[in-house]
Image: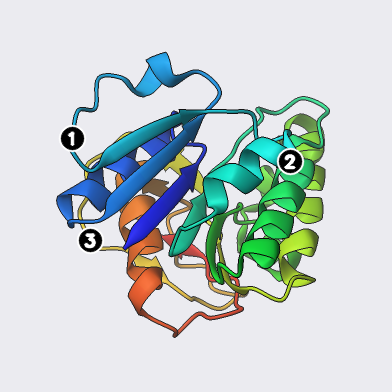
Amino acid sequence: MKLLIFGSTGGTGRELVKQALEQGHSVTAYARNPAKIEDIKHSSLQVVRGDVLDPAGVEGAVAGQDAVLSTIGAGAGRTTLREEGTRNIVAAMEKAGVQRLVCQSSLGIGDSRANLSIFTKYIVVSVFLRHAFADHEGQEAVVKQSSLAWTIVRPPHLTNGPRTGAYRHGFSPTDTLIKGKISRADVADFMLKQLTDDTYLRQTPGVSY
């Protein structure tokens, strides 16, 4: 497939790029700073410089793609980058007729808040990550209101561990057995699998160990 990846220079985004290339896809990596991904060399990789907040740039990158994956991030500060960037992505996809979108959000958004531990829920999220979570809420709303064939993936705490392929997904919001962490490599593995699997079409599966 011809894949466009937003957030390609972040931890999960870089894993998406590498794993997609390994699987034989043609990848366009959209990056504000291409230097951060120049160490990945492949004949099927094209790096496009651009800002997700630039509607024209996003529209140009989306044209001709088969699917889009997004792991755009903005840290924990007060921001609407995820929401506004995703709005541009969705608008460009709808205009170009590109239907499949796999978007990374976060466990703890919406009904998955119940999956979080008490400490994470009331201290980490409520105090330190409240702005980021508000941005994720807005981001998810934009995706859900679209006409696209979307899947929103919700991982918990991200680690730099290896790709294991041994993780849980689609668990109940009341599941207390999840470990609350997963490697970025395994999140990328799960996101790429959604391109050929409609199990979670227009759903918001959590993914965790």
Q: CA distance from mark 2 to mark 3?
A: 35 Å
Give the mark, 1 or 3, whose residue is nearer the N terminus.
Answer: 1
Quadrant where the N terminus is found in the figure? bottom left
The kind of residue tagged 2 is Pro
The kind of residue tagged 3 is Gly
- Residue 136 appears in the picture as rendered: no
Q: CA distance from mark 1 to mark 2?
A: 27 Å
Q: Is residue 191 left or right of residue 40?
A: right
Along the viewing direction, whichever of 119 and 7 lies nearer the viewer: 7
Q: Residue at x 54, y 73 (%)?
A: 175
Q: Provide the secondary structure element on which disc 2 rests.
A: helix
Q: Which residue is mark 1?
A: 42
Q: Which residue is mark 2?
A: 55
Give the mark, 1 or 2, whose residue is nearer the N terminus.
Answer: 1
Q: Provide the secondary structure element on which disc 1 rests.
A: loop
Q: For residue 165, which numbered disc appears in the image?
A: 3
